[in-house]
Image (spheres, rainbow, N blue to C red):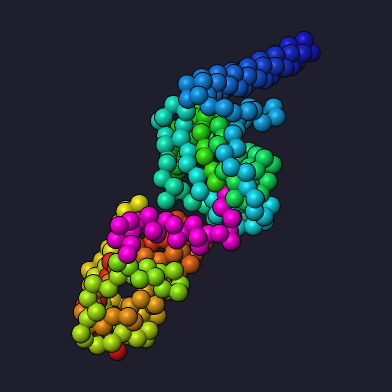
Amino acid sequence: MKVITYKLSLVMFLLVAVTAGCKKEYDNIEVEDEKNIQEYIQKNGLNMQVYDTTGIYYQVTKMGTGSPIDYTQQLPVVYTVKSLDGVYSSQDTILNHYANYFGYYSPASLRDLMKDVLKNQGGSIRIILPSRKAYGRGGNTSLGIPGNASLDFTVSILEKSKLPAYEDQMIKKYLGTDLPNYTKSEDGIYYKISEAGTGKEIRTDSTVTVNYSGSFMNGTVFDSYEGYSSQVDGFINAWKKILPLLKEGGSVKFVTPSSSAYGLQGSSSIPAFSPLGFDVKVTKVGQ
């Protein structure tokens, strides 16, 4: 009986010791997060305030004036993020887009703060997220974020109704000084025909062979191919609208808003609401 009592006492002692150790470790993480954040704020001369008792710091850079932020809506979001120690950084606002349902946006602590503080679409905010509220000890290997990394976010929640104007500005910036040489279609597609072509006409049911390249608005080529063949009907809408302006042998450069490309959500390889630039040479037209 004494042996059983002794064993139970030992088990209880070990449980208390483990629990105390975990509590101490959690407290240490909380203290370390706060220390790192305060040093970062002071070093960068930031003017931020803490959100309740969460240890999350934020600064509203622009209040939203659009419709209320709603978890059940698909909202276009542009963001940058970096770890406070500089080990991880993702600053490209051309590629860092999100447009799924806002309720799926993660980390959840970031999403909830934005809804509570910004309240309306069209706002921008800077948020410092302590590691325990971000991806914790494990980090996020798929994104390349190390463990125990506190993160500095800048986030803009765009008004969905103003997205066409936002993308149009992106396209104009991309074209730069060459903008006057482009014609703008009713659909917001900018195009410049280098060669009209002298061969067969192109219809939407034509099969064409093309050499092409496609670029994001930061100049990165995301796809290129020589001798690609398809029916015009099989292309994205921008191609269906622009290719019939050419004949066989023709060449064209065009930049399309996402509405005539891969839409609000993008695709597996195309970021959400991405305008795209194309350089196309039609080498053959079959009927």
Q: Is residue 272 left or right of residue 193?
A: right
Q: Is residue 114 left or right of residue 178?
A: right
Camera-side residue of 87 and 281: 281
User: What is the magenta segment's predominant secondary structure?
Assistant: helix
Camera-side residue of 152 and 245: 245
- Indicate the position of residue 136 as horizontal and vertical percent values: 55, 31
Magenta-colored stretch includes residue 176? yes
Q: Is residue 184 left or right of residue 250?
A: right
From what the image shows, is residue 135 above or below residue 158?
Answer: above
The residue sitting at 42% across, 50% down in the picture is 95
Farthest residue, direction front: 180
From what the image shows, is residue 109 above or below residue 282?
Answer: above
Q: Is residue 58 left or right of residue 209?
A: right
- Indicate the position of residue 29 as horizontal and vertical percent values: 58, 22
From what the image shows, is residue 199 above or below residue 152?
Answer: below
Farthest residue, direction right: 1
Give the total of numbered labels.
0
The residue sitting at 34% across, 86% down in the picture is 203
Magenta-colored stretch includes residue 105? no
Residue 276, located in which quarter of the rendered image? Answer: bottom left
Which quarter of the figure is the N terminus placed in? top right
Which region shows up in magenta?
Answer: 157-180
- Indicate the position of residue 26 as horizontal and vertical percent values: 62, 22
Which quarter of the figure is the C terminus placed in? bottom left
From what the image shows, is residue 118 above or below residue 31?
Answer: below
Q: Is residue 16 visible?
A: yes
The residue sitting at 45% across, 42% down in the picture is 143
Q: Is residue 223 visible?
A: no
Camera-side residue of 237 and 246: 246
- Indicate the position of residue 175 as horizontal and vertical percent values: 33, 59
